[in-house]
């Protein structure tokens, strides 16, 4: 039951742009006793389940820059394959440390970033981006 609630909570947080996959990894490795590699696999399955809804929402709001998608795929596929081989080669303790450092870096960066306001935004305006269709989406987490 706890695992179900954690999955539900991280899914909801992902919808708000909070990086539920990172939180899921922390839960699985620190509290559920799942090995790092297995937790990474669960996290990938989690992403595959959540990504279509996010993609549909972003496409509906006109927030996808199609030319950028091509470049991201061209760079992302080989980088993902290389990273998978590297993760299988490296000792799991170093993998955990690297993941911890990455999470600390992201956390500090987010804390230091604060809330940025565009000069053209009027006081009290709702945060977010306006898509090509004129609709406003939720703000990005990063």
Image (cartoon, rainbow, N blue to C red):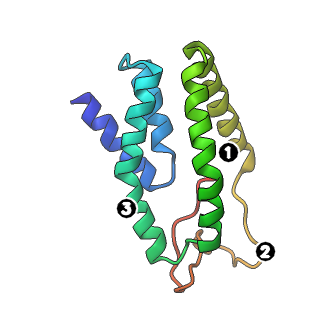
The residue at 40%/68% (across/down) is: 56
Q: Which mark is residue 84?
A: none
The residue at 65%/24% (across/down) is: 98
| Visible residue check, residue 107 | yes
In which quadrant of the rendered view does residue 83 lie? top right
Q: Marks 1 and 2: in contact by CB < 8 Å?
A: no
Q: Marks 3 and 2: in contact by CB < 8 Å?
A: no
Label 3 crowding class (10 Å Cα cut-off): few <14, some 14-19, many 20+? few
SS of the residue under disc 1: helix
Label 2 crowding class (10 Å Cα cut-off): few <14, some 14-19, many 20+? few
* 52 relative to 106, above or below: below
N-terminal of the pair, mark 1 or mark 3, is 3
In which quadrant of the rendered view does residue 65 lie? bottom right
Q: Which residue is mark 1?
A: 110
The residue at 47%/55% (across/down) is: 16
Q: Which residue is mark 3?
A: 53
N-terminal of the pair, mark 2 or mark 1, is 1
Lateral position of residue 87 relative to residue 27, left or right: right
In the foreground, 48 or 138: 48
Q: Which residue is mark 2?
A: 119
């Amino acid at each position: 039951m706890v695992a179900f609630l954690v999955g539900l909570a991280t899914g909801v947080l992902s919808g708000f742009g909070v990086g539920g996959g990172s939180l899921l990894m922390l839960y699985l490795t620190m509290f559920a006793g799942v090995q790092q590699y297995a937790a990474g696999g669960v996290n990938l399955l989690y992403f595959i389940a959540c990504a279509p809804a996010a993609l549909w929402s972003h496409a509906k709001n006109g927030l996808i820059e199609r030319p950028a998608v091509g470049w991201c795929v061209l760079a992302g596929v080989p980088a993902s394959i290389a990273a998978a081989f590297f993760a299988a080669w490296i000792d799991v303790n170093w993998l955990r440390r690297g993941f911890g450092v990455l999470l600390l870096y992201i956390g500090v960066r987010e804390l230091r970033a604060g809330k940025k306001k565009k000069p053209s935004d009027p006081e009290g305006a709702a945060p977010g981006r306006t898509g090509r269709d004129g609709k406003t989406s939720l703000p990005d987490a990063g």
